[in-house]
């Protein structure tokens, strides 16, 4: 029994001695930990040929005006836009003008055959005949009264009838005046004793036909909406900007508004804001701001689209970089490339404001006078990306 026990003790001691040796071998065979990844390069050096393709200049300071940009359009001067409709119901007989025509005050626009007008003209002719008869009866009564051949009440009745007829005649003339008939036209109807029921609608002002929504044969009512025609002043137009609700608080009357139009390349319109809407449109969440154009250039038409800028404060002097000097990286970071010798260019993140006139105003990351790659920044960014691979 003692011999097996000694063997067990000896085996245990041997196992205890072998375990540390096995652990050491495993540590020796384990792979070494990977080194930390190297930081991506921030500079790239070009040879003389490559550097010759990069334009280098010193960052300068420029004046940048705080501004709001918004889409917009040209519109008629709605403050002086005249809605022209028929004061009485009827059927359109003729239309004398087209949309876009320039018209003068009093020029005929369209004519309407109106049953109400025909009735009023008939009433005038009837009232004229009744009055003429009453005047003749009064003259006879006055002659008989001088000869004492009639009773006093007969003369009184003749006077009353004549006065009533005269009043009815004047009321009939006034009814035609309400239809827009002139005194000469009323006299002509009375003299000719002819009923045509034709109502002529004239332009209430000098301007341009903004809209035309009628044609011969159409029925018109005084309450028609939209009106059959509208006349806008030809000397003024509106420039309307649709400002986002986030920018609306910055816009005030009196600020300078400028606009460019895709339809008129090279033309810049400028005026001052004279109205800012008091409510935000529920559908677009935009606020209307407008300026009046007193001298519109040739070819400018209402409803043309415009890109509008409103200067909201006086210009501020800031460090500026050309737009070609800035690269937007995949994570959204904006970078420029600074250099001291025009050969080695170092990537530098910057914070910029909205560009104006081809330049970015710099909030931070660059000082005036530092030399940068004013062009070729995208090439430098790609070269850095190749170095990092």
Image: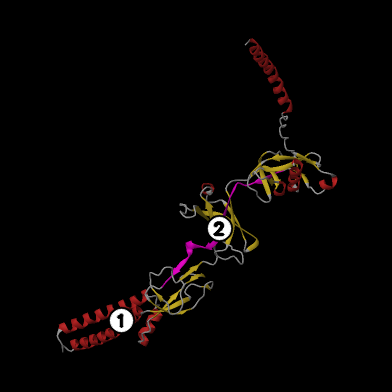
Residue 38 colored magenta?
no
Residue 189 lies, in percent from the top left, at 37, 84
Q: Quadrant of the N terminus?
A: top right
Relative to the observer, which residue lies in front, 28 or 304? Answer: 28
Q: Looking at the image, is 292 positioned above or below residue 15?
A: below
For mark 1, give the secondary structure: helix
Mark before the other along the chain sequence, 1 or 2: 2
Kindly report the secondary structure that dominates the magenta region of the rendered protein: strand
| Disc 2 crowd, CA 10 A, few/some/many (<14, 14-19, 20+) | many
Residue 2 lies, in percent from the top left, at 64, 10
Question: What residue is disc 1 on?
Answer: 123
Q: Contact, CB < 8 Å: mark 1 with mark 2?
A: no
| Disc 1 crowd, CA 10 A, few/some/many (<14, 14-19, 20+) | many
Residue 159 lies, in percent from the top left, at 22, 81
Q: In which quarter of the image is the C terminus?
A: top right
Residue 272 lies, in percent from the top left, at 56, 54
For mark 2, give the secondary structure: strand
Outermost residue on the top side: it is 2
Magenta segment range? Answer: 60-85
Residue 374 visible here: no
Outermost residue on the front side: it is 1
Question: What residue is disc 2 on?
Answer: 72
Q: Report whether 295 appears left or right of 173.
A: right
- Residue 239, located in which quarter of the rendered image? bottom right
Q: Report whether 172 appears left or right of 333.
A: left
Residue at 69% of width from left, 49% of height from top?
323
Marking on residue 283: none
Q: Report whether 344 appears left or right of 217.
A: right
Outermost residue on the left side: it is 151
Choose mark 1 or mark 2, whichever is in front: 2
């Amino acid at each position: 029994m003692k011999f097996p026990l000694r063997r067990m003790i000896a085996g245990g001691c041997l196992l205890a001695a072998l375990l540390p040796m096995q652990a050491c071998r495993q540590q020796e065979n384990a792979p070494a930990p990977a080194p930390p990844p190297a930081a991506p390069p921030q500079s790239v050096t070009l040879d003389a040929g490559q550097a010759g393709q990069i334009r280098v200049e010193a960052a300068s300071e420029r004046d940048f005006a705080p501004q709001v940009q918004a889409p917009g359009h040209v519109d008629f001067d709605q403050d002086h836009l005249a809605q022209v409709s028929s004061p009485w119901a009827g059927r359109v007989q003729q239309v004398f003008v087209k949309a876009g025509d320039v018209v003068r005050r009093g020029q005929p626009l369209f004519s309407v055959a109106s049953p109400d007008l025909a009735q009023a003209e008939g009433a005038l002719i009837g009232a004229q005949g009744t009055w003429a008869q009453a005047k003749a009866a009064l003259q006879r009564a006055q002659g008989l009264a001088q000869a004492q051949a009639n009773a006093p009440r007969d003369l009184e009745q003749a006077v009353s009838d004549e006065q009533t007829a005269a009043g009815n005649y004047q009321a009939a003339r006034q009814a035609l005046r309400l239809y827009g008939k002139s005194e000469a036209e009323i006299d002509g109807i009375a003299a000719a004793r002819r009923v045509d029921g034709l109502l002529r609608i004239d332009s209430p002002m000098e301007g341009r036909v903004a809209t035309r929504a009628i044609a011969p044969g159409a029925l018109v009512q005084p309450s028609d909406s939209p009106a059959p025609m509208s006349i806008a002043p030809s000397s003024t137009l509106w420039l309307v900007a649709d400002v986002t609700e986030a920018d609306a608080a910055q816009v005030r009357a009196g600020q300078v508004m400028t606009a460019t139009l895709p339809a008129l390349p090279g033309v810049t319109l400028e005026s001052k804001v004279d109205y800012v809407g008091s409510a935000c449109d529920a559908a677009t969440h935009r606020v209307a701001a407008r300026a009046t154009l007193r001298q519109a250039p040739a070819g400018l038409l209402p409803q043309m689209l415009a890109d509008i800028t409103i200067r909201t404060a006086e210009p501020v002097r800031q460090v500026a970089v050309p737009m070609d000097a800035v690269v937007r990286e995949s994570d959204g970071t904006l970078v420029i490339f600074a250099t001291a010798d025009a050969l080695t260019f170092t990537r530098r993140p910057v914070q910029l404001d909205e560009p104006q006139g081809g330049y970015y105003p710099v909030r931070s990351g660059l000082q005036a006078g530092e030399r940068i790659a004013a062009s070729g920044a995208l090439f430098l960014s790609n070269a850095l990306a190749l170095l990092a691979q």
